[in-house]
Amino acid sequence: MTPQLALPIGRDAATRHQRASAAPVAALRGHDLTVAERSALLDCYATPDRTFLEIATTHRVDRERLQELWFDLFLTPSRR
């Protein structure tokens, strides 16, 4: 029997870094965002188990603004 490879699960930095691939970073290019907004959006992508309110509070951004940015950039991206 072959041993199963244990994948890291949780909120550790390595897992977040691995999940924050080039795709979400590319989606943020060309948009006028603050550093806090960019960080919060990447955090939303990397930790989908957290709420917008938790992430917005952590990064000190407005929850409504964060949620609007998320839907605009990742769920209905503009066509170029």
Image (cartoon, helix red, strand yellow):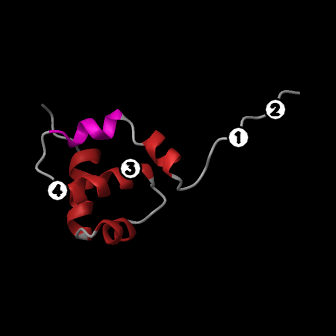
**For marks 4 and 2 on the same chain, the one whose residue lies earlier in the sequence:** 2
10 Å neighbourhood of mark 3: few (<14), some, or many (≥20)?
some
Q: Amino acid at mark 1?
A: Ala
Q: In 3D space, how far apart are the residues under numbered discs 4 and 2 (Cα atoms)?
A: 45 Å
Left or right: residue 64 compared with residue 5: left
Q: Residue at x 38, y 49 (%)?
A: 45
Q: Position of residue 43 (x, y in %)?
A: 37, 54
Q: Which residue is mark 1?
A: 6
Q: Magenta region: which residues?
A: 22-29
Q: Position of residue 42 (x, y in %)?
A: 34, 50
Q: Residue furthest top?
A: 2
x then y, percent, for residue 62: 22, 70
Give me the C-alpha separation between circle 3 and circle 2.
31 Å
Q: Which residue is mark 4?
A: 34
**Front tag of 3 and 2:** 2
Marks 1 and 4 in Cβ contact (< 8 Å): no
Residue 45's mark?
Answer: 3
Mark 1 or mark 4: whose residue is earlier in sequence: 1
Q: Secondary structure at mark 4?
A: loop
- In 3D space, how far apart are the residues under numbered discs 4 and 3 (Cα atoms)? 17 Å
Mark 4 or mark 3: whose residue is earlier in sequence: 4
- Residue at (70% x, 40% y) in the render: 6
Q: Which structural element holds mark 2? A: loop
The prevailing secondary structure element of the residues shown in magenta is: helix
Q: Amino acid at mark 3?
A: Tyr
Work out which quarter of the rendered image holds the C terminus and state it. top left
Residue 15 to residue 21: above or below: below
Kindly identify which numbered label has been placed on residue 3.
Answer: 2
**Label 3 or label 2, whichever comes before in sequence order:** 2
